[in-house]
Image: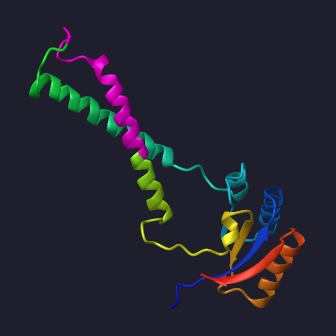
Amino acid sequence: MSNNKEVLYGLYNDEEILMDAIRTANGKGLEIMEVFTPFPVHGLDDVLGLSESRLHIAGFIYGITGTSIAFGFMTWVFTRDWPIIFGGKPYFSAPAFIPITFELTVLFACVGMVITFYTICGMAPGVELPRLDDRITDDKFCIAFNVNDASSDKISGLKSFFKETGAEEVNTKTI
C-alpha cells in the first residue's frame, strides 16, 4: 500500500476569488483536502468550517510555567539559599522580582509556542514537506482535492468546478 496521494489542485490569483470558490465547493458538498495561501486570509477559517486553534491555551500554560519557575526560584534564592538584605529591602521583596518574572514568562511562552507550532506542523529540522507548487508561497492561492480513489467522472467534475470558479491553472500531482 502506497502513502502517496494523488492531488488535483487549482491555482487562483486573488483571495476573494478563492473565498468564492470555497463557498461554491461547500455548497456543492465537495470535500476540500487543503487550501494554501501565501499570506493569512481573513475569514478563511470560518468559510472552511475550522474551529479556533487551542494554541493560545498552550501559550498560557508555558507562560504560567515561566512565571512559577521565576518567582519560585527567586523566592528560594533570596529567602533560603542566599538571604542578603539589598538596600534595606526584606528577604522576600516581590516588587523586585517582577522584571525577571516577566522576562521568564515571555521567554517560556515564546520558546514553548515555537516548539509546539513546529511540532504540530511537522516542520522538524531536516524534514522536507511536499509542495504542490512553488508559486503558492509567493503569489498564488490554491484549493486541493484528494483524487486517489476518484472516478474519471469525479475528476472531470472537479476540473469543471475549477474552470467555473475562475482558477487560472489546474494541475495534478502525486505527493
Q: Residue at x 51, y 91 (%)?
A: 1
- 75 sits to left or right of 37: left
Q: Where is residue 20 in the image (x, y as percent from the top left)?
A: 83, 59
Q: Depth check: 174 or 125 in front?
A: 125
Secondary structure that dominates the magenta span: helix
Identity of the residue furthest to the right in this view: 164
Q: Which of 150 and 8 is in front in this view?
A: 8
Residue at 17% across, 17% down:
91
Above or below, comparing residue 11 to residue 119 in the picture:
below
What residue occupies the far top of the structure in this picture?
88
> Image quadrant for the C terminus?
bottom right
Q: Which residue is drawn at 33% across and 39% down?
A: 65
Residue in the foreground of this view, choosing between 173 and 87: 87
Residue 57, given in percent of the width and then of the height, sits at 46, 44
- Quarter of the image where one finds residue 156: bottom right
Residue 111 visible in the displayed image: yes
Q: Can the viewer see residue 32 in this picture?
A: no
- Based on the picture, tell me whether residue 108 belongs to the magenta stretch: yes
Q: Give the range drawn in magenta.
A: 87-110
Q: Is residue 106 left or right of residue 142?
A: left
Q: In this view, does 72 lie above or below 2?
A: above
Q: Is residue 23 magenta?
A: no
Q: Where is residue 98 in the image (x, y as percent from the top left)?
A: 34, 23
Quarter occupied by residue 17: bottom right
Its colouring scheme is: rainbow
Residue 35: x percent and y percent?
A: 68, 65
Callout count: 0
Horizontal side, residue 101 vs residue 10: left or right: left
The answer to which image quadrant residue 5 occupies is: bottom right
